[in-house]
Amino acid sequence: MAYWLVKSEPDAFSWDEQVANNVEPWTGVRNHQAKKNLMAMAVGDLAFFYHSNVGREIVGVVEIVRAAYPDPTAPQGGWVCVDVRAVGPMPTPVTLARIKADPVLSDLALVRQSRLSVVPVSDAHWSHLCRMGGWAA
DNA sequence: GCCAACGTTGGC
DNA sequence: GCCAACGTTGGC
């Protein structure tokens, strides 16, 4: 079982919409490294839902409920998506500012590769971030 | 609105 | 295959 973090601009697709839809295909990823991460996801993996640009904080947790399959929004094919289900909101959203201020998280992929929209999270970082957000893992 | 990081494109 | 130009992402 692995952990991830996925980013969405709330103007495009927000946590509230994820909760309303419950299960949502995570489409539109057009970066090879992000694609590689999507392909590595397994059913049952958990991911933080992060609001980029507006908010800049981890707002919730989702579960991967369908492994990588061809992204229907990619006209030429070649890209993949997964289905994610809302598990619950972060009791206290974890802001990027707090993440950056914490030396334990200095090598988090979110910080080191800020433009990558699907990144892995180590077990240690996952539990650390859960503690920061008041999430009972 | 600006800028840094980084991916893509196209000329050579 | 190299590199400059350009576009996009995302933080500030």
Image: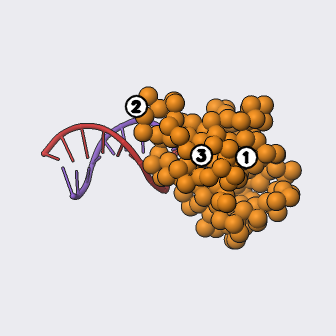
Chain colours: A orange, B red, C purple
Relative depth, front residue between A19 and A94: A19
Number of the front mark, 1 or 3: 3
Q: Chain of mark 2?
A: A
Instruction: Name the residue type under label 3.
Output: Ala
Residues under numbered marks 2 and 1 in contact, where contact means CB atoms less than 8 Å apart: no
CA separation, marks 1 and 3? 13 Å
Q: Residues within 10 Å of mark 2 (few under 14, many from 20)?
A: few
| Camera sees residue A25 | yes
CA separation, marks 3 and 2? 20 Å
Instruction: Name the residue type under label 1.
Output: Val
Residue tagged by mark 1? A62
Residue tagged by mark 2? A76
- Residue A74 at x, y = what percent? 47, 32
Q: Is residue B11 left or right of residue A43?
A: left
Q: Identify the residue at image location x=84%, y=52%.
A: A92
Q: Chain of mark 1?
A: A
Instruction: Name the residue type under label 2.
Output: Gln
